[in-house]
Image (cartoon, rainbow, N blue to C red):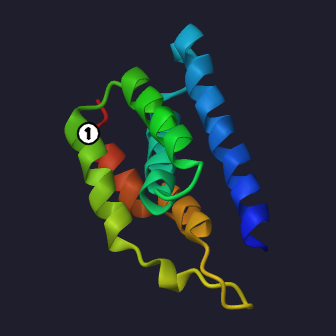
Amino acid sequence: MGISLMRNYLTVLVSSTSLLACASSSSSNSFSEWELFKSYSLSSCIATHYEESNIYQDAIDALNGYREFGSLPLEAYHEVSAVINSYSPEQYRSKAGNISELAMCVVIQNSKDIKDIYAKYAR
């Protein structure tokens, strides 16, 4: 996948998560705590790995929205950063040899690590 196509895909993906965060402001009960936490994890990973792209601010806005509407303690959100940093983008190479941080972020969002953090802090 070409770089510009990937950037367009990321813009759509994170814009969608931003819209979900905004939608939750009018109906914060629409998303479960688990859905908010998983979405926070994805947005945080995207913000971490795409700091130099146009998608960065959208990812930041989305993760802040998810955290704002969630009720987990801040420690849970801080632990997500450690999980993100424990993964290596090098493990997510396509057959053509391109690294896909986005694929890694989706894996992280659905990982046992994220589930364990949630289980630790969910009431």
Q: Nearer the viewer, residue 93 or 113?
A: 93
Q: Nearer the viewer, residue 3 or 29?
A: 3
Q: Is residue 45 left or right of residue 119?
A: right
Q: Residue at x 70, y 58 (%)?
A: 7
Picture layout, residue 38 above or below residue 22: below
Q: Residues within 10 Å of mark 1 (few under 14, many from 20)?
A: some
| Residue 10 on image: x %, y % | 67, 53
The residue singled out by tag 1 in the image is 121
Q: Is residue 28 left or right of residue 76?
A: right
Q: Amino acid at mark 1?
A: Tyr
Q: Residue at x 59, y 32 (%)?
A: 18
Q: Residue at x 45, y 40 (%)?
A: 60
| Residue 79 on image: x %, y % | 26, 52
| Residue 4 on image: x %, y % | 75, 64
Q: Nearer the viewer, residue 20 or 54?
A: 54
State the quadrant of the N terminus: bottom right
